[in-house]
Amino acid sequence: MLTLSEDILCYIGRLITDKEKTSLSETCIILNTIKCKFIYSEKVHVDKIILLPYYDNFESVEMTLSTMTHKSPKNIKHIYFTGNIIYIPQCVTHLTFDRTFNEPLYGCIPSSVTHLTFNNDFNQPVEIGDIPNSVTHLTFGDSFSQYLNDCIPSSVTHLKFGVNFEGPIDGEIPASVTHLTFGFYFDTPVRNNIPPSVTHLTFGFYFNQLIDNAFPSSITHLTFGNSFNQRIENSIPASVTYLTFGEYFNKPICTCIPKTVTRLIFGHRFNKHIFGCIPKSVIYLEFGECFNQSIEGSIPSSVKHVVFHSNHQSLKHIPTSVTHITLHGEDPILSDMPPTITHLTFGMWFKQPINNIPLSVTDLNLSSKYHNIIHQSIVARVKISIFDD
Protein backbone atom coordinates (compact mmCIF):
# COMPACT_ATOMS: atom_id res chain seq x y z
CA MET A 1 0.00 0.00 0.00
CA LEU A 2 2.91 2.30 0.81
CA THR A 3 4.35 1.75 -2.69
CA LEU A 4 1.00 2.64 -4.21
CA SER A 5 0.85 5.78 -2.09
CA GLU A 6 4.32 6.82 -3.24
CA ASP A 7 3.37 6.24 -6.86
CA ILE A 8 0.29 8.40 -6.47
CA LEU A 9 2.23 11.15 -4.70
CA CYS A 10 4.95 11.12 -7.34
CA TYR A 11 2.27 11.42 -10.02
CA ILE A 12 0.78 14.38 -8.16
CA GLY A 13 4.28 15.85 -7.99
CA ARG A 14 4.39 16.05 -11.77
CA LEU A 15 1.31 18.29 -11.71
CA ILE A 16 2.33 20.85 -9.07
CA THR A 17 5.05 23.48 -8.65
CA ASP A 18 8.31 22.89 -6.79
CA LYS A 19 7.11 25.12 -3.96
CA GLU A 20 3.92 23.09 -3.67
CA LYS A 21 5.96 19.87 -3.56
CA THR A 22 7.95 21.23 -0.63
CA SER A 23 4.80 22.37 1.18
CA LEU A 24 3.18 18.97 0.66
CA SER A 25 6.18 17.11 2.05
CA GLU A 26 6.16 19.30 5.18
CA THR A 27 2.59 18.46 6.18
CA CYS A 28 3.58 15.38 8.23
CA ILE A 29 6.52 13.10 9.06
CA ILE A 30 5.38 10.35 6.71
CA LEU A 31 5.13 12.72 3.75
CA ASN A 32 8.50 14.28 4.59
CA THR A 33 10.25 11.31 2.99
CA ILE A 34 8.49 11.90 -0.31
CA LYS A 35 10.55 15.06 -0.95
CA CYS A 36 13.42 12.75 -1.91
CA LYS A 37 11.20 11.10 -4.53
CA PHE A 38 10.01 14.26 -6.27
CA ILE A 39 11.77 15.65 -9.35
CA TYR A 40 12.20 19.45 -9.20
CA SER A 41 12.03 21.11 -12.62
CA GLU A 42 12.06 24.87 -11.90
CA LYS A 43 15.26 26.95 -12.21
CA VAL A 44 17.25 27.27 -8.98
CA HIS A 45 20.80 28.43 -8.17
CA VAL A 46 23.10 25.56 -7.28
CA ASP A 47 24.17 27.23 -4.02
CA LYS A 48 20.62 26.91 -2.68
CA ILE A 49 20.46 23.15 -3.15
CA ILE A 50 24.03 21.85 -2.89
CA LEU A 51 23.59 20.59 0.70
CA LEU A 52 20.15 19.05 0.25
CA PRO A 53 19.93 15.25 0.50
CA TYR A 54 17.83 15.25 -2.68
CA TYR A 55 20.28 17.44 -4.63
CA ASP A 56 20.32 14.95 -7.51
CA ASN A 57 16.57 15.43 -8.07
CA PHE A 58 16.92 18.94 -9.54
CA GLU A 59 16.64 19.26 -13.33
CA SER A 60 17.15 23.01 -13.93
CA VAL A 61 20.17 24.58 -12.26
CA GLU A 62 21.78 28.01 -12.51
CA MET A 63 25.57 27.85 -12.29
CA THR A 64 28.47 30.29 -12.39
CA LEU A 65 32.21 29.94 -12.89
CA SER A 66 32.78 29.50 -9.14
CA THR A 67 30.12 26.80 -8.79
CA MET A 68 31.07 24.70 -11.82
CA THR A 69 33.37 22.73 -9.50
CA HIS A 70 30.26 21.27 -7.82
CA LYS A 71 29.18 17.89 -9.04
CA SER A 72 26.11 18.35 -11.21
CA PRO A 73 22.80 16.80 -10.09
CA LYS A 74 22.33 13.36 -11.64
CA ASN A 75 18.96 14.38 -13.11
CA ILE A 76 20.12 17.70 -14.51
CA LYS A 77 18.71 18.60 -17.93
CA HIS A 78 18.81 22.41 -18.00
CA ILE A 79 21.82 24.57 -17.15
CA TYR A 80 21.61 28.37 -17.01
CA PHE A 81 25.23 29.44 -17.21
CA THR A 82 26.96 32.68 -16.15
CA GLY A 83 30.66 33.35 -16.69
CA ASN A 84 33.51 31.82 -18.70
CA ILE A 85 33.11 28.26 -19.90
CA ILE A 86 35.10 25.55 -18.16
CA TYR A 87 33.02 22.39 -18.33
CA ILE A 88 29.43 21.58 -19.22
CA PRO A 89 28.21 18.10 -18.18
CA GLN A 90 27.44 15.62 -20.96
CA CYS A 91 23.96 14.94 -19.56
CA VAL A 92 22.67 18.49 -20.16
CA THR A 93 19.92 18.76 -22.79
CA HIS A 94 18.88 22.42 -22.37
CA LEU A 95 21.65 25.04 -22.16
CA THR A 96 20.96 28.76 -21.68
CA PHE A 97 23.80 31.27 -21.38
CA ASP A 98 23.45 34.30 -19.15
CA ARG A 99 22.73 37.68 -20.79
CA THR A 100 26.34 38.84 -20.15
CA PHE A 101 28.02 35.78 -21.67
CA ASN A 102 30.22 36.70 -24.64
CA GLU A 103 33.01 34.15 -24.92
CA PRO A 104 34.25 32.04 -27.86
CA LEU A 105 32.66 28.59 -27.84
CA TYR A 106 35.66 26.49 -28.91
CA GLY A 107 33.51 23.36 -29.23
CA CYS A 108 32.61 23.34 -25.54
CA ILE A 109 28.92 22.50 -25.98
CA PRO A 110 28.31 18.78 -25.30
CA SER A 111 26.56 16.56 -27.83
CA SER A 112 23.72 15.93 -25.38
CA VAL A 113 22.36 19.48 -25.81
CA THR A 114 19.12 19.74 -27.82
CA HIS A 115 18.01 23.27 -26.85
CA LEU A 116 20.65 26.02 -27.01
CA THR A 117 19.95 29.65 -26.15
CA PHE A 118 22.35 32.60 -26.26
CA ASN A 119 21.15 35.71 -24.49
CA ASN A 120 21.68 39.42 -25.12
CA ASP A 121 25.44 40.05 -25.15
CA PHE A 122 26.73 37.06 -27.11
CA ASN A 123 28.31 38.19 -30.40
CA GLN A 124 31.20 35.84 -31.12
CA PRO A 125 31.98 34.15 -34.43
CA VAL A 126 30.54 30.63 -34.47
CA GLU A 127 32.59 28.05 -36.32
CA ILE A 128 31.53 24.79 -37.92
CA GLY A 129 31.30 22.22 -35.12
CA ASP A 130 30.81 24.72 -32.31
CA ILE A 131 27.12 23.85 -32.29
CA PRO A 132 26.74 20.05 -32.06
CA ASN A 133 24.51 18.02 -34.37
CA SER A 134 22.27 17.19 -31.41
CA VAL A 135 20.84 20.73 -31.24
CA THR A 136 17.27 21.03 -32.54
CA HIS A 137 16.27 24.41 -31.04
CA LEU A 138 18.73 27.27 -31.52
CA THR A 139 18.16 30.85 -30.34
CA PHE A 140 20.60 33.73 -30.79
CA GLY A 141 20.39 36.81 -28.57
CA ASP A 142 19.88 40.43 -29.53
CA SER A 143 23.57 41.35 -30.02
CA PHE A 144 24.45 38.52 -32.38
CA SER A 145 25.31 39.92 -35.82
CA GLN A 146 28.02 37.56 -37.10
CA TYR A 147 28.25 35.85 -40.49
CA LEU A 148 26.91 32.33 -40.16
CA ASN A 149 29.57 30.54 -42.24
CA ASP A 150 27.72 27.20 -42.29
CA CYS A 151 27.75 27.03 -38.48
CA ILE A 152 24.13 25.90 -38.11
CA PRO A 153 23.93 22.09 -38.09
CA SER A 154 21.37 20.18 -40.13
CA SER A 155 19.75 18.93 -36.92
CA VAL A 156 18.20 22.34 -36.14
CA THR A 157 14.43 22.54 -36.61
CA HIS A 158 13.67 25.75 -34.69
CA LEU A 159 15.92 28.73 -35.47
CA LYS A 160 15.49 32.20 -34.02
CA PHE A 161 17.63 35.31 -34.54
CA GLY A 162 17.70 38.35 -32.28
CA VAL A 163 17.44 42.10 -32.82
CA ASN A 164 20.75 42.89 -34.58
CA PHE A 165 21.13 39.99 -37.00
CA GLU A 166 20.89 41.32 -40.58
CA GLY A 167 22.26 38.40 -42.60
CA PRO A 168 23.21 37.51 -45.22
CA ILE A 169 21.48 34.12 -45.19
CA ASP A 170 22.35 32.85 -48.69
CA GLY A 171 22.56 29.07 -48.32
CA GLU A 172 22.85 29.34 -44.54
CA ILE A 173 19.47 28.02 -43.37
CA PRO A 174 19.58 24.19 -43.20
CA ALA A 175 16.88 22.16 -44.93
CA SER A 176 15.94 20.75 -41.52
CA VAL A 177 14.51 24.05 -40.22
CA THR A 178 10.72 24.13 -39.84
CA HIS A 179 10.32 27.23 -37.63
CA LEU A 180 12.31 30.31 -38.67
CA THR A 181 12.16 33.68 -36.91
CA PHE A 182 14.08 36.83 -37.87
CA GLY A 183 14.66 39.76 -35.55
CA PHE A 184 14.07 43.50 -35.48
CA TYR A 185 16.67 44.78 -38.01
CA PHE A 186 16.59 41.94 -40.53
CA ASP A 187 15.77 43.42 -43.95
CA THR A 188 17.55 41.21 -46.44
CA PRO A 189 16.17 39.63 -49.65
CA VAL A 190 15.01 36.09 -48.94
CA ARG A 191 14.18 34.76 -52.40
CA ASN A 192 15.69 31.27 -52.82
CA ASN A 193 17.00 31.40 -49.25
CA ILE A 194 14.07 29.94 -47.31
CA PRO A 195 14.32 26.13 -47.49
CA PRO A 196 11.24 24.06 -48.43
CA SER A 197 11.20 22.53 -44.96
CA VAL A 198 10.02 25.78 -43.31
CA THR A 199 6.39 25.77 -42.17
CA HIS A 200 6.44 28.74 -39.75
CA LEU A 201 8.10 31.96 -40.94
CA THR A 202 8.18 35.17 -38.89
CA PHE A 203 9.78 38.50 -39.84
CA GLY A 204 10.76 41.32 -37.50
CA PHE A 205 10.00 45.04 -37.51
CA TYR A 206 12.15 46.31 -40.42
CA PHE A 207 11.63 43.62 -43.05
CA ASN A 208 10.23 45.28 -46.20
CA GLN A 209 11.58 43.35 -49.17
CA LEU A 210 9.81 42.30 -52.36
CA ILE A 211 8.39 38.83 -51.82
CA ASP A 212 7.17 37.69 -55.24
CA ASN A 213 8.16 34.02 -55.60
CA ALA A 214 10.19 34.33 -52.40
CA PHE A 215 8.52 31.69 -50.24
CA PRO A 216 8.36 27.89 -50.55
CA SER A 217 5.01 26.11 -50.72
CA SER A 218 5.68 24.44 -47.36
CA ILE A 219 4.82 27.54 -45.31
CA THR A 220 1.61 27.33 -43.27
CA HIS A 221 2.15 30.20 -40.80
CA LEU A 222 3.42 33.52 -42.21
CA THR A 223 3.89 36.64 -40.08
CA PHE A 224 5.17 40.01 -41.29
CA GLY A 225 6.60 42.74 -39.08
CA ASN A 226 5.35 46.31 -38.82
CA SER A 227 7.39 47.86 -41.68
CA PHE A 228 6.29 45.46 -44.41
CA ASN A 229 4.26 47.26 -47.10
CA GLN A 230 4.93 45.56 -50.44
CA ARG A 231 2.47 44.31 -53.04
CA ILE A 232 1.56 40.67 -52.46
CA GLU A 233 0.16 39.50 -55.81
CA ASN A 234 1.34 35.93 -56.52
CA SER A 235 3.42 36.04 -53.35
CA ILE A 236 1.57 34.20 -50.58
CA PRO A 237 1.91 30.41 -51.00
CA ALA A 238 -1.29 28.38 -51.32
CA SER A 239 -0.14 26.37 -48.30
CA VAL A 240 -0.56 29.27 -45.84
CA THR A 241 -3.31 28.89 -43.24
CA TYR A 242 -2.29 31.63 -40.75
CA LEU A 243 -1.45 35.02 -42.28
CA THR A 244 -0.58 38.12 -40.24
CA PHE A 245 0.31 41.58 -41.56
CA GLY A 246 2.02 44.27 -39.49
CA GLU A 247 1.17 47.87 -38.68
CA TYR A 248 2.12 49.60 -41.97
CA PHE A 249 0.73 47.15 -44.53
CA ASN A 250 -1.85 48.86 -46.77
CA LYS A 251 -1.83 47.27 -50.21
CA PRO A 252 -4.68 45.79 -52.31
CA ILE A 253 -5.46 42.21 -51.36
CA CYS A 254 -8.00 41.04 -53.95
CA THR A 255 -6.97 37.70 -55.52
CA CYS A 256 -3.94 37.74 -53.18
CA ILE A 257 -5.13 35.78 -50.15
CA PRO A 258 -4.97 32.01 -50.74
CA LYS A 259 -8.10 29.92 -50.28
CA THR A 260 -6.27 27.93 -47.61
CA VAL A 261 -6.06 30.82 -45.10
CA THR A 262 -8.18 30.28 -41.98
CA ARG A 263 -6.76 33.05 -39.76
CA LEU A 264 -6.24 36.50 -41.31
CA ILE A 265 -4.98 39.52 -39.35
CA PHE A 266 -4.49 43.06 -40.69
CA GLY A 267 -2.50 45.74 -38.88
CA HIS A 268 -3.14 49.32 -37.83
CA ARG A 269 -3.02 51.10 -41.24
CA PHE A 270 -4.79 48.64 -43.51
CA ASN A 271 -7.76 50.37 -45.17
CA LYS A 272 -8.41 48.81 -48.58
CA HIS A 273 -11.77 47.56 -49.85
CA ILE A 274 -12.34 43.89 -49.13
CA PHE A 275 -15.45 43.04 -51.19
CA GLY A 276 -14.80 39.66 -52.81
CA CYS A 277 -11.30 39.58 -51.33
CA ILE A 278 -11.65 37.45 -48.20
CA PRO A 279 -11.64 33.74 -49.10
CA LYS A 280 -14.36 31.44 -47.80
CA SER A 281 -11.79 29.47 -45.84
CA VAL A 282 -11.25 32.27 -43.28
CA ILE A 283 -12.58 31.55 -39.78
CA TYR A 284 -10.82 34.30 -37.78
CA LEU A 285 -10.67 37.85 -39.21
CA GLU A 286 -9.09 40.90 -37.56
CA PHE A 287 -8.95 44.56 -38.70
CA GLY A 288 -6.81 47.43 -37.38
CA GLU A 289 -7.70 50.91 -36.17
CA CYS A 290 -7.68 52.67 -39.57
CA PHE A 291 -10.04 50.27 -41.31
CA ASN A 292 -13.31 52.00 -42.25
CA GLN A 293 -14.32 50.28 -45.50
CA SER A 294 -17.78 48.85 -46.03
CA ILE A 295 -18.10 45.27 -44.88
CA GLU A 296 -21.53 44.71 -46.42
CA GLY A 297 -21.40 41.38 -48.24
CA SER A 298 -17.64 41.26 -47.73
CA ILE A 299 -17.22 38.88 -44.81
CA PRO A 300 -17.80 35.26 -45.90
CA SER A 301 -20.09 32.93 -43.98
CA SER A 302 -17.11 30.81 -42.95
CA VAL A 303 -16.00 33.48 -40.46
CA LYS A 304 -16.74 32.69 -36.81
CA HIS A 305 -14.68 35.36 -35.02
CA VAL A 306 -14.33 39.04 -36.02
CA VAL A 307 -12.10 41.61 -34.31
CA PHE A 308 -12.36 45.38 -34.82
CA HIS A 309 -9.86 47.86 -33.35
CA SER A 310 -11.87 50.98 -34.22
CA ASN A 311 -15.34 52.50 -33.87
CA HIS A 312 -15.91 52.84 -37.62
CA GLN A 313 -18.06 49.80 -38.24
CA SER A 314 -21.75 49.11 -37.89
CA LEU A 315 -22.21 45.53 -36.82
CA LYS A 316 -25.38 44.95 -38.84
CA HIS A 317 -23.46 43.65 -41.86
CA ILE A 318 -21.64 40.93 -39.95
CA PRO A 319 -22.88 37.51 -41.14
CA THR A 320 -24.88 35.30 -38.82
CA SER A 321 -22.10 32.71 -38.95
CA VAL A 322 -20.12 34.89 -36.52
CA THR A 323 -20.33 33.73 -32.90
CA HIS A 324 -17.37 35.65 -31.43
CA ILE A 325 -16.91 39.43 -31.68
CA THR A 326 -14.07 41.44 -30.15
CA LEU A 327 -14.36 45.25 -30.08
CA HIS A 328 -11.33 47.31 -29.07
CA GLY A 329 -12.74 50.77 -29.80
CA GLU A 330 -13.66 53.23 -27.07
CA ASP A 331 -17.21 53.79 -28.29
CA PRO A 332 -18.21 50.96 -30.66
CA ILE A 333 -21.64 50.84 -32.29
CA LEU A 334 -23.51 48.14 -30.35
CA SER A 335 -26.80 48.29 -32.24
CA ASP A 336 -27.70 45.66 -34.83
CA MET A 337 -25.34 43.09 -33.39
CA PRO A 338 -26.07 39.68 -34.96
CA PRO A 339 -28.36 37.46 -32.86
CA THR A 340 -25.90 34.59 -33.18
CA ILE A 341 -23.16 36.09 -31.01
CA THR A 342 -22.25 33.87 -28.06
CA HIS A 343 -18.91 35.39 -27.03
CA LEU A 344 -18.52 39.17 -26.75
CA THR A 345 -15.24 40.85 -25.81
CA PHE A 346 -14.62 44.56 -25.16
CA GLY A 347 -11.06 45.94 -25.12
CA MET A 348 -9.34 48.16 -22.60
CA TRP A 349 -10.68 51.43 -24.10
CA PHE A 350 -14.34 50.48 -23.86
CA LYS A 351 -16.10 52.70 -21.27
CA GLN A 352 -19.83 52.49 -22.06
CA PRO A 353 -22.42 51.07 -19.68
CA ILE A 354 -23.60 47.66 -20.88
CA ASN A 355 -27.38 47.72 -20.93
CA ASN A 356 -28.36 45.64 -23.93
CA ILE A 357 -26.60 42.78 -25.67
CA PRO A 358 -28.11 39.91 -27.69
CA LEU A 359 -29.82 37.17 -25.70
CA SER A 360 -27.56 34.70 -27.50
CA VAL A 361 -24.48 35.98 -25.62
CA THR A 362 -23.26 33.48 -23.03
CA ASP A 363 -19.77 34.85 -22.36
CA LEU A 364 -18.79 38.48 -21.81
CA ASN A 365 -15.09 39.36 -21.53
CA LEU A 366 -14.06 42.72 -20.10
CA SER A 367 -10.79 44.51 -19.43
CA SER A 368 -9.72 44.93 -15.81
CA LYS A 369 -9.84 48.67 -16.61
CA TYR A 370 -13.60 48.59 -17.21
CA HIS A 371 -15.43 50.48 -14.44
CA ASN A 372 -18.98 51.13 -15.60
CA ILE A 373 -22.45 49.71 -15.08
CA ILE A 374 -23.58 46.31 -16.35
CA HIS A 375 -27.34 45.80 -16.33
CA GLN A 376 -28.42 43.32 -13.68
CA SER A 377 -30.27 41.14 -16.20
CA ILE A 378 -26.99 40.63 -18.08
CA VAL A 379 -25.07 39.86 -14.89
CA ALA A 380 -27.67 37.22 -14.01
CA ARG A 381 -27.53 35.28 -17.28
CA VAL A 382 -24.05 35.79 -18.73
CA LYS A 383 -20.67 34.46 -17.64
CA ILE A 384 -18.44 37.52 -17.15
CA SER A 385 -14.66 37.17 -17.29
CA ILE A 386 -12.03 39.82 -16.57
CA PHE A 387 -8.69 39.92 -18.37
CA ASP A 388 -5.55 42.02 -17.80
CA ASP A 389 -4.28 44.19 -20.66
Image: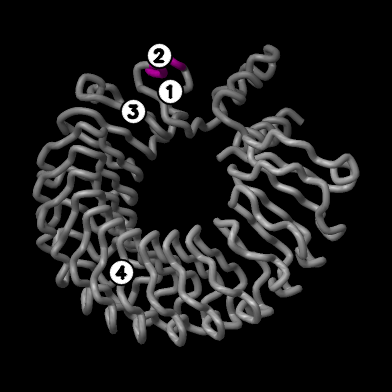
Mark 3 falls on what kind of element? strand
Q: Is 353 part of what is drawn in magenta? A: no
Q: Position of residue 38 (x, y in %)?
A: 56, 29
Residue marked by disc 3: 62
Mark 2 falls on what kind of element? loop
Q: Quadrant of residue 103?
A: top left
Marks 4 and 2 sit apart, C-alpha to C-alpha, by 43 Å
Q: Position of residue 269 (x, y in %)?
A: 42, 62
Density class for disc 2 (Cα within 10 Å; few <14, some 14-19, many ≥20) is: few
Please name the residue shown 41% across and 25% down the image.
44
Q: Considering only order in the chain, which callout, 3 or 1, is on the residue closer to the N terminus?
A: 1
Task: Tell me the magenta residue range.
Answer: 48-52
Side (left or right) of 16 relative to 384: left
Marks 2 and 3 sit apart, C-alpha to C-alpha, by 15 Å
Q: Considering only order in the chain, which callout, 3 or 2, is on the residue closer to the N terminus?
A: 2
Of residues 354 and 85, the one drawn nearer to the viewer in this rendering: 354
Q: Can residue 334 be seen by looking at this rendering?
A: yes
Number of marks drawn: 4
